[in-house]
Image (spheres, rainbow, N blue to C red):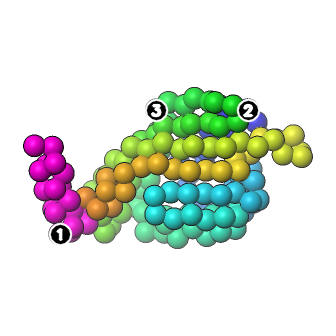
Amino acid sequence: MNRPSLAQALVALYNQGGPYTAAVLGNLYTDDIRFTDPAHTVVGIDALASYLNHQYASVTACTFTATSEWACGDTLFLQWDMVLRHPRLAGGNRITVNGLSQLQCHSCADGQTRIALHRDYFDLGQLLYENVPLLGSATRWLKQRLQA
């Protein structure tokens, strides 16, 4: 799989939702995948499947839209927008989070290209802090004060 189609397949995988299994994830990730986001790091395809299933267990809707992508050597960068609904965030309303994934690609013995490192960059405040009762109000107030 070439890098652009790998990015498209990754977006499709996350848009179809779980349950995530090592077999499903193994089509795109190496067995020793290192996945990092602003809150967690997991290593290994089984750990990634468990992490994703846990993170999305209470999500009522989640879609990703790739907004741009570019490659530099073996690294693919994928810019995206995630729109999600979670009953305990923003009163269950839609939340949009902008992010960037750094995907280190690896040619495997079977001739396929898979992701060996997946690092997500996004504002955890945009996802979480701004959308939790009380904490959200304080976070939004602080951001407004910093912009003034």
Q: Is the residue under label 1 in contact with that under label 3 (CB below 8 Å)?
A: no
- Earlier-in-chain disc, 2 versus 3: 2
Label 2 with label 1: CB-CB less than 8 Å: no
Query: Circle 2 — which element?
Result: loop
Above or below, 6 relative to 59: above
Q: Is 35 or 25 nearer to us in this picture?
A: 35
> Mark 2 sits on what residue?
2
| Mark 2 and mark 3: Cα distance apart in space | 18 Å
Give the side of residue 126 with respect to residue 133, left or right. right
Which quadrant would the N terminus be assigned to in this image? top right
Q: Give the range drawn in magenta.
A: 131-148
Return the disc, 3 or 1, that comes first in the chain's sequence.
3
Please give the label number shown on residue 67.
3
Give the residue type at disc 3. Answer: Thr
| Residue 90 in the image, given as x and y percentages of width and height | 25, 60
Q: Examine the rendering and report whether any part of residue 110 can be seen.
A: yes
Amino acid type for the residue under numbered disc 2: Asn
Q: How far apart are marks 3 and 1 (CA)?
A: 32 Å
SS class, disc 3: strand
Categorize mark 3 by other alpha carbons within 10 Å: few (<14), some (14-19), many (20+).
Answer: few
The vertical placement of 136 against 95, above or below, is: below
Say if the magenta span includes residue 146.
Answer: yes
User: In x, y percent, where is residue 18?
Assistant: 58, 61
**Identity of the residue drawn at 16% across and 48% down:** 146
The location of residue 41, given as percent across then percent down, is 56, 63
- Main SS, magenta region, reads helix
